[in-house]
Image (cartoon, rainbow, N blue to C red):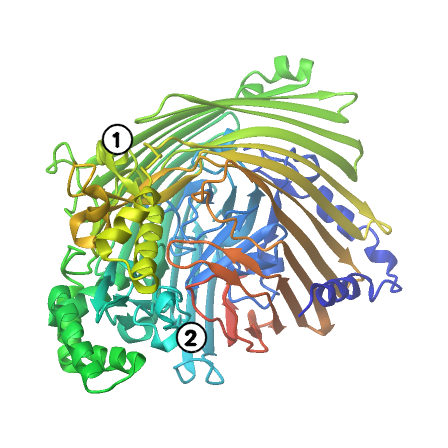
Amino acid sequence: MKIHYCIIFLFISLTGFSQTENPKNQDSIKKEVLNEIVITASRRSENLMRSPISIEQLKSAEAKIMGALSIYEALENVKDVQIITPSLSFKVINTRGFANTTNVRFAQLVDGIDNQAPHLGTPIANALGANDLDIDKIEIIPGTAAALYGMNAINGLANIQTKNPFEYQGISIQQLTGINHVGNIDRFSPKAYSQFNLRYAQTFSDKIAVKLNVSTTGGTDWVADDRTDLAPNANASTNLFGTNNPAYDEVNGYGNESANRKTLNLNGKNYVVARTGYRETDISDYEIKNYKADVGFYFRPKTGHELSVTYKTALINTIYQRSNRFRLDNYTLNQFAVDYHTPVFQVKGYATTENTGDSYNMRSLAENMDRAFKSDNNWFADYTSAYKNAITNGSSVPDAHKIARTTSDTGRFEPGTEAYETKKKELVNINNWDIGAALRVKSTLVHAEGLINWDKAFSSSFEKIGTKLLSGFDYRNYIIVPDGNYFINPENDSENLTYQKTGAFTQVTKDLFNQKLRLGATLRMDKSDYFDTKFTPQFTAVYSPKESLSFRASYQNGYRFPSIFEGFSNVNSGGVKRVGGLRIMSDGIFENSYTKASIDKFQAQVNSDVNTLGLTQAQAIEKNKNTIQKNPYTYLEPEFVKSFEVGFRGMALNQNLFIDADFYYNSYKNFIAQVEASIPNTTDPALIPTSLYSRTTQNRYRLWTNSKSKIYNYGGSLGLKYRLNQMFTALGNVTYTKLDRTDDKDGLEDGFNTPEFNVNGTLIAENIWKKLGASASARYQNNYDYISFLVSGNVPAYWTMDAQVNYNFKKSGITTKLGGTNILNKAYSSILGGPSIGGLYYLSLTWEIKKI
């Protein structure tokens, strides 16, 4: 589908009913926009038109009449937002480039409270968030929000705002039942999908209220089964390609990666041979499950003052993707929070605990399942013997490799057998990735923050000078229990790891020229363990020549400190040790190692010279030894971004059309990335090349470090909302995101991983007949390059449609909704290595026992 088709669709949606006039509705968009209050952009209530930076929002009422499964998933229709899908129940939000499946550059809050899983540094979608019945709206800052929030929000921030029980009382129940895997697009026959939500809110006086939410989700995940070979040229010098390639490594096959290969000299030729491994469809459980609940107690001692005490819990079974794919089983998150706010100040504290339960690493499971029946040394020895016998018996080279693999795999654990299931159960409970696959992490995040509105405390003084002054502080501590595999404490493994951050900011705004111009300045200070103090400024200006028109400009800096995993990881996996980039974890490794990229090139050149020039291995090593390069990288520093943005908001066409446009330019440096390197098992310079030629005579590492590249990107977006009449509303947006250039390119810069064009169009019809409504949404994104440690390549362009019809039985309080996502059931993938996404069709019933 070409992009101009989607633009035509968007144009039709916005103009197709433009001749329809309804005088009663002429100022409907105007009233809506001018009365719209946002709080996330500047951490104080303000009119949307006067927001100093770009801010997007999705209101519950609007999202519920879209075809998406949930309000959270309806964010795919919002301007500037990119969502990638590692799993049906694990969607990742991003804005303005550099997306990945562990998006630690984008923060996600619920009522201002971070709902990340501490050791991941990112939320598991909305698994610990609010359910649909309790969400009021979602506000999104696309672009850096570091000056006000810190928290590594250098790419953006989402704040999910829930319904206060004093204002929204009653009981609501929602049951959504659906079906996916329709039409044999993957290995499953059609599977049921279910989502249940309950909300109860009650006041017991004008001072006391309680709120309870319960949610359950269950179904069968989308399947990841990409069989593209990741090592297509490993044996190019012997003309073995495709299924004849003995180093064949499927994208969603695990246990046959580079760490599971060996170069074998067979009858005078060097061949790169991999263990067989297992496909994800053989080793993963695709059942998804999310049970979550929260309860809150609210107390208003007097007008404008409110104390809330809340507790949240969640259990998650899903698939998570990083450099490997992980199965999360019985993964639990718990959060306890206390918040007290008045018109003058707010104080808040919360703690989040994480337990990975019975989760496991699919790659480690696959490679250790292979090793459980036969060690690497024995398997490669059997392969060598079987290959030579096959050649002796007259087989061709490709057939000899196939015979050798079949012979060496005799006795292998076969998926679906009792022996396989028994061994799998054993391995997923061994917390050592050299011999097992368990992911066993326990962690806690403790956070406290406060705000004070000086202009509210001393209102008369600040009103005289037309100035507002806001100050805030925050403190955060990550506490990790060493498990001996994923995390260790190198100083004392009997003590927990801690990682503390402290920040504070002051923001001043000043109105000028009869309040038509508002200037703002913010200065933030952050101090984190292991790093010097960093200062983050922000400068903003909003010019509003009239009530329905505003222009904005801003400049700000932002820092991102390393996450727990980036700083402290210590994982053995398949002979490669993944080590955090803080000196406390990787002292001495950077200085004494050589880059894997240069070692791979060196090994390939040696094999090619042996196979094509007839050199001995020793001669080929001597000839190519200068290819090996010392590791030029060093210990972690925070990432840094500079961001400039301009924007416009206004209304046209008799106040029925709302326009919001923005343009930005960013520059980044010190991207936190990974480098693979090896230390040879010798200090003799003459022996180092020979040591690095063989995987058995080197210690291999994957280290977190900073890219030396300086990266620049820019983009813009245009969002339109047009109220055609009392029945029809059209929404549309176009987002353009472009990588400008990369200076000092070193190959470690994060993948931009973002489509250049993203186009959305939605047509909403309300009260078509009595209380019958409907909507249709279409999304398009062009193809884009995707870079990750799991797989790199090009993500194909796709377009997809969601639709729904709904009817409100007003007397009974029941609303029905019949709809579907990707209704044409044309499978697509949003990322490489991730699942193929098909259609999901559902019927939803929502019963408001008492009007909310």
The reply, left or right, for residue 140 in relation to residue 384 is right
Residue at image point 50% right, 47% down: 98
- Residue plotted at (36% across, 53% down): 294
Q: On screen, 361 above or below 663?
A: below
Q: Which residue is mark 2?
A: 193
| Disc 1 element | helix
Point out the tag, 1 or 2, that comes first from the N-terminus: 2
Amino acid type of disc 1? Arg
Horizontally, is 737 left or right of 682 in the view?
right
Is label 1 in contact with label 2 (beta carbons under 8 Å)? no
Residue 259 in percent (x, y) is at: 25, 58
- What percent of the width, then of the height, locates residue 256? 28, 66
List the residue tagged with mark 1: 583
> Could you say where residue 675 lies in the image, as x and y percent from the top left?
35, 44
The local secondary structure at tag 2 comes to strand
Residue visible at 26% across and 77% down in the picture: 401
Find the distance from the CA under tag 1 to the CA under tag 2.
47 Å
The location of residue 739, given as percent across then percent down, is 59, 45
Q: What's under tag 2, amino acid-wise?
A: Tyr
